């Protein structure tokens, strides 16, 4: 017989990945009354923890590990959720309904939830294997960086001006390091934000003492005694440094799923219930390509805690027989220095922006418009706009006169 998890060791639900999505899937299953055996398999060697603090409070030393755990350690055993930590899934047999673990053992499943997230995109240039090059994805990455700082590293080059690179730069400045940030495109946050936000953060980082280099590539990492000693740019300039932080995106961690026949090109494809094309296999979080209702149904992957948690809830409900299509408003945040950015909605395909407030005051909102309707808000220090902007988007915002929207005295809730 196949299809029911026939391996001698079988669980009702096997969850691959113990990050945000995996942890929330297990929590949601129990909350919804699932009483079967749940096994979580994860490469991380510690119980589920939050990733955002790894480039923020944890890296800065402001929050210890206990405070970034998704649940206290004993929670998992209390709920009867088995954790197989430090263990990777290397293969899936969709006919047999089983997975192979890195130690060669097999584990059967009735339902499989794949929450593998992504692996950091690596540098492919000479010197990329030197010591003191850090990618910020797992706790162990942040720990290694903190150890380098403790042993005296003080001059950092950050490669990549996305959120992770910018947040790391902010923490390193706070810790007293000299920081140079190198971005290949002509502005930071170019993939995710409009020009107003990019220029604001560039100015802020420069004001805080970061040297921000735009439209610049890196051609080589230089080393002495196996350790980083500098970075050569594509114009041949060399920046001396003793550590390099790389934040140039992720590659969805879906190898075994695709090898097993699941459809997908950018990650793995899922439907509105987070089902892959393999029977009884769901995928959620960073690795799941889905048609997003807040992006005119464009097929995208979202890399956010919101998306991982909400997809986990969707998959758990579907497994429990309470199928509800994924329909959650995307939101995100980023902390840099004393600035809190909160974003709501997706700005994909925006054709205009409206600025509410003055960036000079360090409190303002960028509204992204498409065909006269707001589709997303980037709120810097404007919590009210964020909360009310979310409501506006959730209710399906109509066309709004940009002049009215630009007036910070007009509350967004009055435009509902
Ligand atoms: P992850 O949380 O990455 O979990 C995936 C897990 O699966 C990992 O533990 C991985 O080791 C494991 N895994 C992968 N393959 C296998 C395998 N074959 N076998 C076993 N285990 C496997 N989002 C926000 O909304 N706001 C923020 O401010 C923010 N800041 C961030 C800062 C940093 C430094 C990072 C790295 C991310 C940040 N994010 C932020 C993004 C957010 O953390 C991710 O979107 C979220 O963690 C995605 O959850 P996930 O479950 O899909 O993947």
Image (cartoon, rainbow, N blue to C red):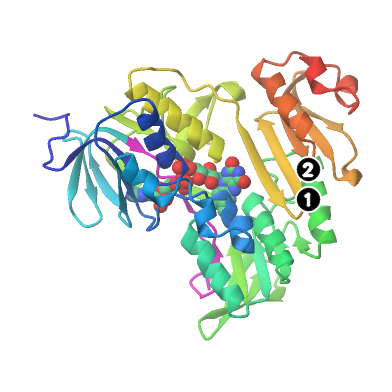
Q: Is residue 391 left or right of residue 210?
A: left
Observer-nearest of 382 and 165? 382
Of residue 51 and residue 406, the one placed in the foreground of this image is: 51
Judging depth in this view, the residue of 86 and 266 nearest the camera is 86
Q: Which image quadrant: the C terminus?
A: top right
Q: Quadrant of the N terminus?
A: top left
Q: Helix, strand, or loop for circle 2?
A: helix
Residue 247 appears in the picture as rendered: no
The dominant secondary structure in magenta is loop
Identify the residue shown where x is 76% and y is 35%: 383
CB within 8 Å, label 2 to label 1: yes
Q: Is residue 405 above or below residue 56?
A: above
Q: Nearer the viewer, residue 127 or 367?
A: 367
Residue visible at 68% across and 61% down in the picture: 171
Mark pair 2, 1: CA separation: 6 Å
Read off the magenta span: 113-136
x, y percent for residue 264:
40, 35
Across and down, in percent, residue 255 comes to 35, 46
Picture coordinates of residue 51, whole percent (x, y): 53, 50
- Classed neighbour count for the residue bearing mark 1: other residues with Cα under 10 Å, few (<14), some (14–19), many (≥20): some
In the image, residue 33 sits, relative to residue 203, either above or below, namely: above
- What label does residue 201 carry, if any? 1
Residue 397 on image: x %, y %: 72, 16
Q: Quadrant of residue 222?
A: bottom right
Is 126 inside the magenta-drawn segment?
Answer: yes
Mark 2 lies on residue: 197
């Amino acid at each position: 017989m196949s299809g029911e998890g026939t391996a001698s060791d079988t669980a009702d639900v096997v969850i691959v990945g113990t990050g945000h999505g995996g942890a929330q899937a297990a929590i949601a299953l129990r909350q919804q009354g699932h009483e079967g055996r749940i096994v979580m398999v994860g490469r991380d060697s510690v119980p589920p923890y939050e990733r955002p603090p790894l480039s923020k409070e944890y890296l800065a030393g402001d929050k210890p590990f206990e405070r970034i755990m998704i649940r206290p350690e004993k929670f998992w055993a209390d709920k009867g959720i088995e954790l197989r930590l430090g263990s990777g899934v290397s293969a899936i047999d969709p006919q047999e309904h089983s997975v192979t673990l890195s130690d060669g053992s097999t584990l059967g499943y009735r339902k499989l939830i794949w929450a593998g997230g992504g692996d950091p995109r690596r540098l492919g240039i000479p010197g990329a294997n030197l010591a003191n090059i850090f990618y910020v994805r797992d706790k162990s990455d942040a720990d290694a960086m903190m150890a380098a700082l403790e042993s005296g590293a003080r001059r950092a080059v950050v490669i990549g001006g996305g959120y992770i690179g910018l947040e790391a730069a902010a923490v390193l400045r706070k810790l007293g390091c000299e920081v140079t940030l190198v971005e290949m495109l002509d502005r930071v946050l170019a993939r995710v934000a409009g020009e107003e936000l990019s220029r604001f953060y560039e100015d802020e980082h420069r004001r805080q003492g970061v040297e921000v280099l735009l439209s610049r590539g890196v051609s080589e990492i230089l080393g002495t005694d196996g350790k980083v000693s500098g970075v050569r740019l594509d114009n041949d300039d060399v920046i001396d440094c003793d550590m390099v932080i790389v934040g140039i995106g992720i590659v969805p961690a879906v190898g075994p799923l695709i090898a097993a026949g699941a459809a997908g090109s950018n990650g793995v494809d899922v439907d509105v219930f987070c089902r892959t094309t393999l029977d009884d296999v769901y995928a959620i979080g960073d690795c799941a390509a889905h048609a997003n209702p807040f992006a005119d149904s464009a097929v995208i992957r979202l890399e956010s805690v919101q998306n991982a948690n909400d997809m986990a809830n969707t998959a758990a409900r579907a497994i429990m027989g309470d199928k509800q299509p994924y329909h959650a408003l995307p939101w995100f945040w980023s902390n840099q220095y004393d600035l809190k950015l909160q974003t709501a909605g997706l700005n994909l395909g925006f054709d205009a922006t409206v600025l509410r407030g003055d960036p000079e005051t360090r409190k303002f909102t960028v509204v992204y418009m498409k065909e006269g309707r707001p589709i997303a808000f980037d709120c810097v220090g404007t919590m009210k706009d964020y909360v009310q902007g979310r409501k506006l988007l959730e209710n399906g915002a109509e066309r709004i006169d940009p002049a009215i929207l630009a007036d910070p005295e007009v509350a967004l809730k009055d435009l509902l």
